[in-house]
Image (tube, rainbow, N blue to C red):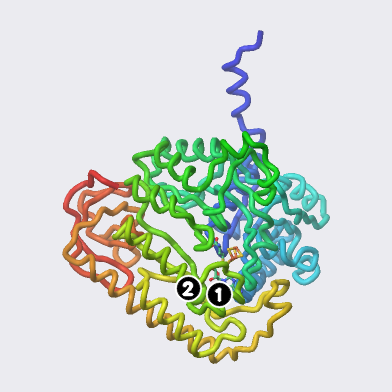
Amino acid sequence: MSNPELAIKKKSTPLYKESRKLFIESYGCQMNFSDSEIVASILAKEGYGMTEDYKDADLVLLNTCSIREKAEATVRKRLETFNLLKKEKPSLKVGVLGCMAERLKEKFLEEEKVVDLVVGPDAYKDLPNLVKEVDEGRNAINILLSKEETYGDIAPVRLGQNKVSAFVTIMRGCDNMCTFCVVPFTRGRERSRDPKSILKEVRDLFEKGYKEVTLLGQNVDSYLWYGGGLKKNYKKATELQKKTAIDFSKLLELVALEVPDMRIRFSTSNPQDMIESVVHTMAKYPNICKYIHLPVQSGSDRILKKMNRLHTRQEYFNLIDTIRKHIPDCGISHDMITGFPTETEEDHQQTMALMEYVKYDFGFMFAYSDRPGTYAHRKIEDDIPLETKKRRLSEIISLQQKHSAYRTKQYVGKTVCVLIEKESKKSNLFWSGRTTQNTVVVFPKENYSIGDFVDVVIENCTTATLIGKGTNLSKSL
Ligand code: SAH
Ligand code: F3S
């Protein structure tokens, strides 16, 4: 009989020594950063070790974003650097991953001669084959979108600089079809990951010493596990599958119970899919962070409709009221788009009024960018002059700054629990971390360490940051 211990040992010995070097750069959303960790894991098995210096690399991969024109322009500009490097080092291979790969397909190989490899977000498991093709001197491409792929069976190589917080993907794709958005085209249809593999990954992180996990999905509230497959096929699920299905609020609860000493965050929520039970689960478990990123995009009912956002301004207010009722100290942030086609001054004022009502802790604000292939691009003329978009954008940014300042001021004099993540960028004598509401706090290092939960009394603030002094290690999260 074979010795099982020996078999295990043999299995865990790497097939190759780390003979080649991989440099990955990620752009855009958190999911891209998380996907790059999956890619690193897949290629580690092929003998690729990571390097932080692209000049050392044998293979450079850019995990790209298509959400706005500017995001794509940034990647194209970056490719020039690798084009130059390739002249010095002809053996260098360059690949593009992610949403630009999916959107541009073969065109990428034609337009950017420096690119050898184009791989869409559901095709990373094919990378070993694709890289071999490239090694043999051919360009390689796989942009197939999947009905199943969630990479649930891959243990990501953690690339983040701190060993405190990590991302765990729970669902992929988006079925919402907001008229301005390329994500449904580049990321495919919604499918959820087996909760067992999510719980296992979260537990592993806890055992490795991580203190915080962010559950990721393009539309987390749409999470639904009924045994696998596309969310839209749930209608055809068996009675038993329907009875035992797990939705986002249930998953959140399972994760909270699995790792009670870890902080749990999630992103991103779409107001139209957020159900009240999620708010109750958040209120019930102290380790679920009191913070919701709740993009609204516009405060005008007319524009929301044109964006195919399936809720009204009033329904959004009701949701905000429900959150504040059950979690009075909840941090809330937003995404907003200015200058969506046909947006009038009146629509813009409605957006400002909505912001005034909510007084968000912070927000991400963008000028509308017309994206090829989207409904808005095909059917609605991009008729708002750039100057107007920019002016409206700067107005909402100023308003947000006022609200952020209002929010941070509320904390002065109070004691908050902070999870230390890293050294402050401004001073190596200070730590930087976040509150449960996701507000950044800096305070003197003293004897505290990265990964500690510390009670910090807030003495001062800027619009985005709280400044304080640690009093003791915290007993809460
Ligand atoms: N649900 C997604 C949203 C992705 S897009 C998630 O996982 O975060 C992030 C934000 O980019 C959107 O909320 C929207 O505010 C902005 N955005 C998307 N398409 C855009 C476009 N065409 N022009 C400008 N901003 C856009
Ligand atoms: Fe995009 Fe709307 Fe989905 S913003 S990611 S289509 S929820």
The answer to whether residue 140 is seen in the rendering is yes
Q: Quadrant of ligand 1?
A: bottom right
**Neighbour class for label 2 at 10 Å: few (<14), some, many (≥20)?**
some
- The location of residue 255, given as percent across then percent down, is 44, 41
Local packing at callout 1 (Cα closer than 10 Å; few below 14, some 14-19, many 20+) is: many
| Residue drawn at 42 percent across, 82 percent down | 352
Q: Is residue 218 above or below residue 112?
A: above
Image-based side of 294 in relation to 2, left or right: left
The three-letter amino acid code for the residue at tag 2 is: Arg
Q: Is residue 81 visible?
A: no
> Which of the marked residues, 2 or 1, is nearer the chain's N terminus?
1
Disc 1 designates what residue? 304
Q: Residue at x 76, y 53 (%)?
A: 144
Marks 2 and 1 in Cβ contact (< 8 Å)? yes
Location of mark 2 (residue) = 313
Residue 121: which quarter of the image?
A: bottom right
Depth check: give the residue in front, 414 or 376: 376
Q: Residue at x 40, y 76 (%)?
A: 355
Where in the figure is residue 150, as x and y percent of width and height? 63, 46
